[in-house]
Image: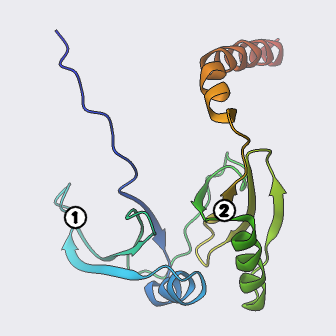
Amino acid sequence: MDKEIAPLKGLYHFAYPCRDAEETRHFYEDILGVPLVNCMLSERVPSTGEEAPYAHFFFELGDGSYIAFFDLGRGDMPEPSPNTPAWVQHFAMETDSVESVMAMHSRLQSFGVKVLGPVDHGFVRSIYFFDPNGLRLEIAARTEQPGFLAKAKAAAHATLQEWSRQKTQRLKARSN
């Protein structure tokens, strides 16, 4: 008999490699305004026991979750996935309004950061940009109409099944 599992509460942290801890701190704390709240130095990976000196540091978002980084001390730029378009892997952060999204757009540009958008997705309005490590970031404000989320949830399984059906057809056609 399966024991019922407790629902997951939310995001604790997302971790990503960085080439330079101070460069990353400057971007997140000084430009984005996300405070550095913890930095740990270690010579060994706790989960594997592997000897690998690193700094692991955390920036706290307004909801109490974190975006974290590992500086492995080699100065290497993280490499993107070779089989994934750059727009796919990204970390999205929410702000309180479209006006706040636009204020961040202006702020980023004033620091020389190239910004894409705003993009209206119909339920959020977003801007996109890259951090110094090549991580694509999104800042979004919710704009969904009342009832949108309930309708999306009710249709989610059927929509995913339709996607799977279409994908199977495309893959079969490609292999012929």
Q: Secondary structure at mark 1?
A: loop
Direction from residue 95 to residue 1 in the image, left or right: left
Q: Which residue is mark 2?
A: 138
| Crowd class of label 1 (few under 14; some 14 to 19; many from 20; radius 10 Å) | few
Residue visible at 20% across and 55% down in the picture: 48
**Mark 2: few, some, or many residues within 10 Å (few <14, many ≥20)?**
many
Residue 176 placement (x, y as % from top left): 83, 11
Q: Position of residue 94 (x, y in %)?
A: 59, 61
* Tag 2: amino acid: Glu
Residue shown at 82% from the left, 57% from the top: 119
Look at label 1 and name its amino acid: Val
Q: Say which mark, if any, is on residue 45.
A: 1
Name the quadrant containing residue 33.
Answer: bottom right
* Residue drawn at (78%, 83%) of the image: 106
Q: Report the label total.
A: 2
The foreground one among 45 and 106 is: 106
At which x and y percent is residue 107?
72, 85
The picture quadrant where one finds residue 31 is bottom right
